[in-house]
Amino acid sequence: QNSPFKSAMKASRSGLSRAFRRERVHAGAHSGGGISVSERGFLACMYFGRVNILEAVAHNLRCRVQNEGEDDDEEGSLVCVCIKPTADEVVTADRQLRLRRWGVAGEKATLEKTVARATEAPVLALAYDKSGTLVVTGGSDRLVRVFDMEKGFCTHSFRGHMGLVHHVTFAPTTKPLRALSCSEDTCVKVWDLHDNRCVATVKGHMSAVTGVAFDVAAKVMVTCARDQVLSFWDLETFGNLLNVPVYEEMEGVQILPAAAHRMLVEAGEDAEYSGLVAAAGGKGLLRVWAYRREDAGKKTGKDKGKAKKKIKVKLVKEQSDGPTPELGYKGILLARRGADAGAPEAEQILAVSGDHNFLFFDMNLDFQKLTIGYNDDILDVKELPAGDGDAPHRVVVATNSADVRIFDTADFSVVPVQGHTDTVLSVDVSKDGAFLATASKDKTLRLWDLRPMLGDSSSRLSDVPCLMECRGHTDAVGAVCIAQKAAAAAAGSVTKWEALWEHAFLASAASDKTLKVWLFPPLDNASGKLSSPQSQTPALSIKAHDKDINAVAIAPNDSLIATASQDKAVHVYELRIEAGKARAKRVELDLKFQLKGHKRGVWMVKFSPIDRAIATSSGDRTIKIWGLANGQCLKTFQGHTSSVLNMAFLRNGMQLASCGADGLIKIWTIRTNECEATIDAHSDKIWALAATHDGGHLLSGGSDSTLVVWKDVTVEEEERQIVENELMVEKEQELANSLYKRDFRRAAALSFELDKPLRLLKVLSDYLDQQWMRSAEKQNPFVEMVATWNEKYVWKSLEYLKTWNANMKHMVLAQLLLDALLRTRISPKSWKRHKDSLELCDGILTYTSKHAERVDRLIEASYLVDHVLRCNTELLDADPTQNGAAVTPNLEDERTKYTIAEEAESDEDLEEAMDLAVVPAAETAAQAVQDEDLPDDGRGQDGEAQQGTPDEEHESAPKTRSKRKRRRSQELGTADAVEETKGTPRRSLRRTRSRASAEFTDSTEVAEFTESTEVPESTATADAQSSGKKATDTPSSAKVGTDAPSSAKAAKGGGETTPMRRSKRKRSKPNHLT
């Protein structure tokens, strides 16, 4: 494979980096728990409550399986997994006691079947049968269950173990079909699924059985346990054949295929033995035993006719190379290379270490490669430059481990560098990649020789020798740096070695607040070969700060050393080395600058590769650039939301990349103080950041156990942006042409492509107006348009529609479009499958319900309009002659009253004017009521009025008044309403009078008794003169109901009327007379 760093970096038009893309990612794959492998070469590994599906040999992440919407620490997290042998399916068990079957053929796992409440206790072990139909489970409830995962039900349930069932498997034979279970009660039970019973109990181990393997041809079953014994059993009778002591706790066992039998040939045992079994355990070594079944001759006497079955076992191979895990092995599997699974060379032995790493061995037990299952926190990272060959580049990574890991960026295989006894906190690589320096919590530094690895892709652990071990610090060493100029010269020819070797040095800083300088070890001979690791003492040691030192840096010309500390200060020292004939005689450090300006501890310091300046990053969330001429702060960069933990120069010092505890990487242009790009890189703190020597890549790692290789894609992004802009201009013009031609369907499609919802809204609005003007049936015009949209446009229109529906102005269009989509394009199944369906549904329903409520209120309000119109229609259509008189309201009088009320300038003027206008009409109405209430209407047989004497009229007045009073109370209210109107503000009074006049005009009953009887002119004139200006100021409707009796009384009593007085009460708010 080509290295991601092989091609030279192309400069952008501005010469700056503005865009980076993930090129390679190494994330955590296994954090402990069960591992299952398929015949197609895929691994299913548990990783913090979810399952990772990997290509076993290539270690590429295929997909992840996780219960949707549930975090790793919640009850729905997964606890166990097994992968189907012949297909891309896995079965998982979670903490909610569910079994789920997932399809993992693509990049995203799909849930296919769920068995709810499958068990009564958490499942600890799962296994598929050979056909991939049945799954056997074992859990903490001591039960063994068998499930048909195709149909989703339990077929068998076995009880018999006295402890937790931690390992289950199926026997390789299908007739009869049997399942085996291992428990903490040290027993192995064999269950017959046909007879539904336990057919055998294998006893012999003194501790829990951890692994079971089968050899069908030899009819042998092999078990291993933590009692340091490897046992062989007869597969038919399950009787013990042989117990082999191995003197270590065994964690896994596998029968090796025929491809591994060349080990027998090499050992000269191919004729005597027929099978091989490999086992791994706590010592971290793989071992292979050869075995052969043999039957003893016939016996005499009691055992006559019976043959005694025996087996012969011999250790033939033991792991000789490769790393030795300190925590030993936790399992052993057989892995294949996917499509090449049938090739013998593709089959490999996969051993899982106690620190969750994967070690691959060939069938001859030769170490192939190491891949990391879990990095933990990545604390530091540096690029290892390539040599003259085309070998893939490597990355040196310091994790929360005592081992330094050198990753191959092609497949992320690892060469571990072992030597420290505690966590390595910092690493540094020389400019040409020849030397590696490491600093650790064990208070030591180590210098490693990487020259044998340059140009050699097959280098292993033994090819990384340690040159020297530096002891002298009294606390954890947190920072180390190699002199770039001298070390690069020392890695060259022999003459340069002799000339500059004595100037090569290391600088280290620790939590003991000291800065130390270490010289490279002396040469043994002119060839440049070094002696065995030496214990060096520092050439110089000074107390540099008052608190812990976080970082140390050396200038490109090796003349300055800078340190950053938690005391908020950065110290710059001038270095002088006086060389002698053989070795340097004296090393001196002089303090040149104390850079103070940060408000919190300083995490990192770096020298510019070009300018005489240094950059510092601090916990105060800022980055500062300091000039080395006078020690002044030149620039300050602000933008991170948390502590800035690391940084690196880019583009020959023109730009700066920074990372922080907020999980972001920011790219800064130093000249303009601008942030060119912000990359959401990690989900946790980013401790490690480095730029490659060609400037085309960034390396980052953090607390999320993820190592990322970032590629500078500024040139590609600029070219893509140019093409997109040209295409957008063309589409904009085409859209304008489509609108001009009234081609709305093409205009809508272009609006979708341009992602312009406002333009699409205008297109749909114009289309709606055009279709409604043409169509007489008023059907939904969007049905025909949405039929031409593809699936992408449909769901994008729903997202736009959610926004349009929130505006009442566009509500009609949005509802019509939604109706067309739901009727023709979106089914309930497709809605359910869409990832944002719930969010869309909530957004649309919220405002749709509000629109529906508003429409309901309008419909209810329209009933009042219908009622008024119906009443007016009845009034206009009524019989013009009723009771011998016309029933026509006097609209002219009402208009006159309304005009008077509007033109009055004060309450007194309004009262006088209304009295003059209302009293005659009121008295006329009163006379009509009086005549209607009389038992004898006073008319003769010919209909002419008869005049009576005043005495007769006076005698009949009390009865008439009582009847009128009752009728007035029923029809128009009591006289108290008149008093309520006094003291009312003019504007309210006008509105009240207007409403009252309207009621008076529109009411049929009032019109009947006001117009049915004509009042003589003499009576009306007398009443008007007697009342004068003392009439009560009331609305016309109230006047009719209150003053009419008084006028009638005056008429009956001889024409004299007692004037009404104004009320002296305080004005109150008007009662709702209407």
Image (cartoon, rainbow, N blue to C red):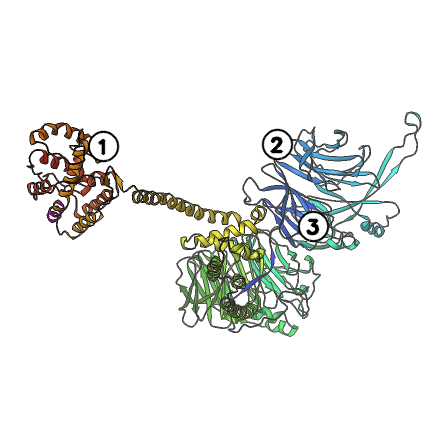
Determine the image quadrant of residue 468: bottom right
Marks 3 and 2 in Cβ contact (< 8 Å): no
Residue 714: x and y in percent read 54, 68
751 or 105, nearer to the observer:
751
Q: Is residue 813 above or below residue 92?
A: below
Q: Mark 3 points at which residue?
A: 42
**Magenta segment boundaries in residue numbering:** 907-914
Amino acid beneath label 2: Glu
Q: Does the magenta stretch include residue 132?
A: no
Residue 901: x and y in percent read 17, 49
Q: Sequence order check: which comes first, mark 2 or mark 1?
A: 2
Q: In this view, does 965 lie above or below 57?
A: above
Residue 989: x and y in percent read 18, 45
Amino acid beneath label 3: Phe
Q: Is residue 200 left or right of residue 658?
A: right
Q: Mark 1 points at which residue?
A: 970
Is residue 162 shown to the viewer in this render? yes
Q: What element carries label 2?
A: loop
Q: Sequence order check: which comes first, mark 1 or mark 3?
A: 3
CA distance for labels 3 and 2: 30 Å
Q: Is residue 268 left or right of residue 1039?
A: right
714 or 1051, nearer to the observer:
1051
Q: Sequence order check: which comes first, mark 3 or mark 2?
A: 3
Q: Mark 2 points at which residue?
A: 120
* Number of residues whose C-alpha sits closer than 10 Å to that of mark 2, classed few (under 14), some (14–19) or many (20 or more): few
Determine the image quadrant of residue 96: top right
CA distance for labels 2 and 1: 79 Å
Q: What element carries label 3?
A: strand
Q: In which quarter of the image is the C terminus?
A: top left
Q: How many labels does the image show?
A: 3
